[in-house]
């Protein structure tokens, strides 16, 4: 048996074990905890396979594995669905970088083309699962299966011939002994549909596990596709393209600068809307402009011909001006968000958008420090590192607790409190709400306590997706049972169609 074939069989065995582990976790462990444990099992399986030589990991994989181990506890730390999704998405990004490790020199030099190919490889690998292992990695012609096949066939034929006899004898013996008959009936009382369902889930989970391991840590047969040739467009073409974008951005920034010095009355007379309405509109459009401009500038720099060094310098200077304008637009969007929050309070969408803008501002600066200085391969690693820092900061900061704290502070200052939204936040916000609910009016306090009791007082519901925040929320709600029971039930919230 060739070494590659042996390693392929080892990969299939690990995939089967991952399938069994995933099904067992799904049956006996709450959802989020089961996913965190299964991802841990994938990392452990990959590590064990690497140690025995079944899989291959290049040096950058160690740092990526460390980042994954830091991220996995975050899956069961906070209850926020958005934060959970971001943590899980980050694990996928780490897998893509692992798959790209064979095409990069070090983690501080990652070309975008390598990540694109790796993302496609990982997606294709998960869809294909064990098919490439069975069809290409295992040399079936070299396996000594002739003798074993004959023996297995003989065992199968003998067992098939014995089945009718076993059935007849079982019926007769059961008639002779009722206790024996009842025991055999219980032993062979099998729900075939339920068992098939278990087998299908084991197969699907194992399929995904094999796809993840092979796409990330199997180097044999990996296509080393070259980066498509750069078109090397003339500097004048790209210069005009970027200058046109910069001109439009400059005009817009000029309008924004003029609006900053208007009083509230002058602003409404000039714009036709109040400051609060102005803050509410156009915010996401500004973020989209800033977000879409960056890949366009990166693509333009990639297509730029390097034959004329002076033209490259001029292009980079123009691009730097556009980056400054985009930063000002991002600052305008941030200013609108601050105004919006001061009038309407804080929500998940607003908070996560602020976090995204913070990361994007850092990416703009990193773009200028790398791409515009001829260090394109360093742009992606720095951007990913910044995303990891922002993600860890969000986990530590506890976004839903911050939202609850901000909105409760506004309520204490006389602003209206949206009790339905406040109590609809995840379990992350419950300790903060309980700590500040005493400062609310009696009516608001009763409404908040009753809603919290209805949502988090059910132990079964809390345990469906176990995490540390839900455990803390359940413990906190037990202390308000008496007070909540004495409160009148809040009126149902009407939804506009």
Image: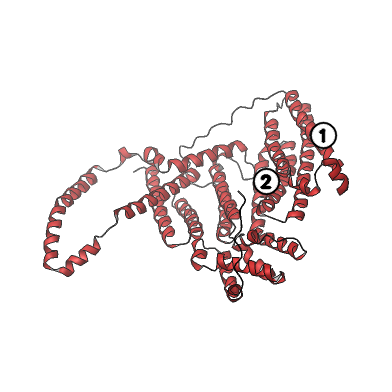
Give coordinates of residue 328: x percent, y percent: 79, 42
Looking at the picture, tell me which residue is in the foreground, 124 or 349: 349
Residue at x-position 67% and y-position 69% = 445
Q: Is residue 249 above or below residue 357?
A: above
Q: Quadrant of the N terminus?
A: top left
Give residue 382's mark.
2
Whole-number angstrom distance, CA of label 2 to CA of label 1:
31 Å
Q: Is residue 100 above or below residue 234?
A: below
Residue at x-position 58% and y-position 62% = 77
Query: On the rendered structure, is 479 left or right of 278?
Result: left
Q: Which residue is mark 1?
A: 251
Residue at x-position 64% and y-position 70% = 446
Q: Quadrant of residue 405?
A: bottom right
Q: Quadrant of residue 198?
A: bottom left
Looking at the picture, tell me which residue is in the foreground, 105 or 232: 232
The answer to whether residue 375 is seen in the rendering is no
Residue at x-position 63% and y-position 58% = 395
Give coordinates of residue 390: x percent, y percent: 67, 53
């Amino acid at each position: 048996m060739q070494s590659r074939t042996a390693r392929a069989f080892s990969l299939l065995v690990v995939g089967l074990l991952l399938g069994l582990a995933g099904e067992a976790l799904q049956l006996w462990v709450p959802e989020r905890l089961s996913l965190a444990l299964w991802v841990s099992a994938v990392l452990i399986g990959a590590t064990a396979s690497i140690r025995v030589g079944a899989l291959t990991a290049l040096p950058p994989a160690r740092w990526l594995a460390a980042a994954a181990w830091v991220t996995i506890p975050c899956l069961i730390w906070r209850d926020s669905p958005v934060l959970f999704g971001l943590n899980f998405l980050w694990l996928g990004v780490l897998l893509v970088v692992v798959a790209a490790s064979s095409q990069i020199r070090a983690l501080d030099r990652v070309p975008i083309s390598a990540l694109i190919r790796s993302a496609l490889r990982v997606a294709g690998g998960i869809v294909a699962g064990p098919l490439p292992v069975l069809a290409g990695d295992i040399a079936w012609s070299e396996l000594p299966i002739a003798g074993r096949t004959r023996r297995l066939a003989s065992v199968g034929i003998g067992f098939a011939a014995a089945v009718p006899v076993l059935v007849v004898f079982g019926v007769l013996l059961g008639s002779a002994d009722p206790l024996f008959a009842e025991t055999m009936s219980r032993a062979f009382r099998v729900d075939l549909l339920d068992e098939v369902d278990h087998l299908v889930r084991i197969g699907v989970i194992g399929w995904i596990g094999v796809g993840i391991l092979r796409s990330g840590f199997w180097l044999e047969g990996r296509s080393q596709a070259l980066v498509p040739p750069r078109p090397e467009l003339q500097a004048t073409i790209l210069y005009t393209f970027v200058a046109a974008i910069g001109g439009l951005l400059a005009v817009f920034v000029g309008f924004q600068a003029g609006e900053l010095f208007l009083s509230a009355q002058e602003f409404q007379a000039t714009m036709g809307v109040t400051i609060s309405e102005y803050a509410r509109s156009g915010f996401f459009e500004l973020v989209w402009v800033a977000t879409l401009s960056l890949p366009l500038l990166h693509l333009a720099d990639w297509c730029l011909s390097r034959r004329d060094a002076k033209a490259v310098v001029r292009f980079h200077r123009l691009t730097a001006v556009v980056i400054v304008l985009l930063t000002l637009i991002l600052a305008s969007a941030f200013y609108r968000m601050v105004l919006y929050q001061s009038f309407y309070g804080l929500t998940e969408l607003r908070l996560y958008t602020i976090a995204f803008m913070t990361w994007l501002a850092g990416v703009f600066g990193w773009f200028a420090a790398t791409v515009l200085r001829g260090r394109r391969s360093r742009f992606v690693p720095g951007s990913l590192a910044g995303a990891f820092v922002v993600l860890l900061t969000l986990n530590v900061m506890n976004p839903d607790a911050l939202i609850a704290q901000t909105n409760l502070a506004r309520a204490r200052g006389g602003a209206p409190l949206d009790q339905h939204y406040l109590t609809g936040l995840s379990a992350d916000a419950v300790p903060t709400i309980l700590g500040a609910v005493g400062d609310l009016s009696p009516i608001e306090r009763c409404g908040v306590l009753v809603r919290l009791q209805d949502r988090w007082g059910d132990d079964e519901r809390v345990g469906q997706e176990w995490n540390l925040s839900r455990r803390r929320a359940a413990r906190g709600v037990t202390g308000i049972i008496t007070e909540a029971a004495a409160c009148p039930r809040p009126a149902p919230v009407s939804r506009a169609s």
